[in-house]
């Protein structure tokens, strides 16, 4: 049964893999190229933030396009847009243009993810949903890790790497465009307001926003920080890949443990550990590559599950019919935090220097832990027998894995 499911979904996983390799390479490449072109740190932060503004716009508007013209046409159009915009980065090296081009890329990727994830969600059942979601997470983080390795294939100051990203996005289109699987249903059973979620789970709201803010700061500005502290291009690719590999390894074990304890304690622990491991970057010499990359892997391992845990914590306070609507709302809040993160951290770095990057991460993660402790003294925990199964979600995506069959 499971092999039959994967035989039907391999085009989606292949397409997702190509997209993640491309996006992983493109994000790091743009940060490096911006530094090479001597864009200011704040200017680079604006460019990187524009991706998340575009992503928010795509998350809001693409479902409307899908309902009008269908999944395949929307996916083909957005893949073409993503393939084109990355080439425009290499041809038109101008910070003003890059801001709008990067926003278009974010818009396109929001729709691409939405199509792939909704299709996978439609293919999954309650019996195999966890396995498919686990495979989805592995493909996501492994693909982004492999993208970091491609950074060493050509000179970041030239156009070749942008061409490679364009090719990868185009390859993602082929199997999905040829897929005969029927389009999934995009109907949402119930809507839910942010104020309702806040009343049920303030920690879920704050953790989701702060998780987006810190993860975007790492993904977008991490390469610039690494370059500023003297790492080579090869070392920067290892630095970013370590973070993603750590995230891939820790996600499922943390989800399993959180199902057997007060979810708030897990969120508090992840926030505190993320702050402590971020401090480790400050006291570990970058020249000790293995140790430095190990610290980065730990940061990825304990910080990336925060978003998933916050969704799970919110779901523990809602009915199953509200899961899809709440996850869509939390996705937008996570995206809002992500849009602010690169801009905020680069503004601080512009004033206080490169070390402010680590201080920013420490403070961001500490806010989650401290607020979680505060909430623990205010409200009783949800009994373990009433907790829902933990949700595995990257810090961007659709409502894949949230929906439960009746």
Image (cartoon, rainbow, N blue to C red):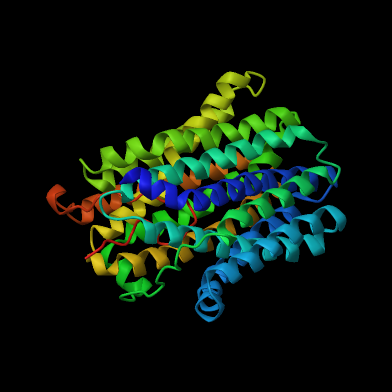
For image coordinates 25% across by 69% down, the residue present is: 321
* Residue 332 visible, this orientation: yes
Most foreground residue, 143 or 106: 143
In the visual, does 237 lie left or right of 1? Answer: right
Q: Is residue 291 above or below residue 406?
A: above
**What residue appears at the point 52 percent right and 51 percent down from the top-left corner?**
11
Position of residue 36 relative to residue 87, above or below, is above
In-front residue for pair 291/321: 321
Q: Quadrant of residue 192?
A: bottom left
The residue nearer to you, when weighing 226 against 251, is: 251
In the rendered view, would you say 265 is above or below 207?
A: above
- Residue at 42% from the left image edge and 56% from the top image edge: 120
Res 262 → quadrant: top left
Q: Position of residue 145 (x, y in %)?
A: 58, 37
349 sits left or right of 277 in the view: right
Q: Is residue 304 visible?
A: no
The residue shown at (38%, 63%) is: 327
State left or right for residue 75 relative to residue 96: left
Query: x%, y% of residue 216?
Result: 57, 51
Residue 107, image x and y in percent?
62, 66
Quadrant in which the C terminus appears: bottom left
Query: Please, is residue 235 above or below residue 59 in the view?
Result: above
Count of marks overlaid on the render:
0
Q: Indicate the position of residue 75 as horizontal and vertical percent values.
A: 59, 65
């Amino acid at each position: 049964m499971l092999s039959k499911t994967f035989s039907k979904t391999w085009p989606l996983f292949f397409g997702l893999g190509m997209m993640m390799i491309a996006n992983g390479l493109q994000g790091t490449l743009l940060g490096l190229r911006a530094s090479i072109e001597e864009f200011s740190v704040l200017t680079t932060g604006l460019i990187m933030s524009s991706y998340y503004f575009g992503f928010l716009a795509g998350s809001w508007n693409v479902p409307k396009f899908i309902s009008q013209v269908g999944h395949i046409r929307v996916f083909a159009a957005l893949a073409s847009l993503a393939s084109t915009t990355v080439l425009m980065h290499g041809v038109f090296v101008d910070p003003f243009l890059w801001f709008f081009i990067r926003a278009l890329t974010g818009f396109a990727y929001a729709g691409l993810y939405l199509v792939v994830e909704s299709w996978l969600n439609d293919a999954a059942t309650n019996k195999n949903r966890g396995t498919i979601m686990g495979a989805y997470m592995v493909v996501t983080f492994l693909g982004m890790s492999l993208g970091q390795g491609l950074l060493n294939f050509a000179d970041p100051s030239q156009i070749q790497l942008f061409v490679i990203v364009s090719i990868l996005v185009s390859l993602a289109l082929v199997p999905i465009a040829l897929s005969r699987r029927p389009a999934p249903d995009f109907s949402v059973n119930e809507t839910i307001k942010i104020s309702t979620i806040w009343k049920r789970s303030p920690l879920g709201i704050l953790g989701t926003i702060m998780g987006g803010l810190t993860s975007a700061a790492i993904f977008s500005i991490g390469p610039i920080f690494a370059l500023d502290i003297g790492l080579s291009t090869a070392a920067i690719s290892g630095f970013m890949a370590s973070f993603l590999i750590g995230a891939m390894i820790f996600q499922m074990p943390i989800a399993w443990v959180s199902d057997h304890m007060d979810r708030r304690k897990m969120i508090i622990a992840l926030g505190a550990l993320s702050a402590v491991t971020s401090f480790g970057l400050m006291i570990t010499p970058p020249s000790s590559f293995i140790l430095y990359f190990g610290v980065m892997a730990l940061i990825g391992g304990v910080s990336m599950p925060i978003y998933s845990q916050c969704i799970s914590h919110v779901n523990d306070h809602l009915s199953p019919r509200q899961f899809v609507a709440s996850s869509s709302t939390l996705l937008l809040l996570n995206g809002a935090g992500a849009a602010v993160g690169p801009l905020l951290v680069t503004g601080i770095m512009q004033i206080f220097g490169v070390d402010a990057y680590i201080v920013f991460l420490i403070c961001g993660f500490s806010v989650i832990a401290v607020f979680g402790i505060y909430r623990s003294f205010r409200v009783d925990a949800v009994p373990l027998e009433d907790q829902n199964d933990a949700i595995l979600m990257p810090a961007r995506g659709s409502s894949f894995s949230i929906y439960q069959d009746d």
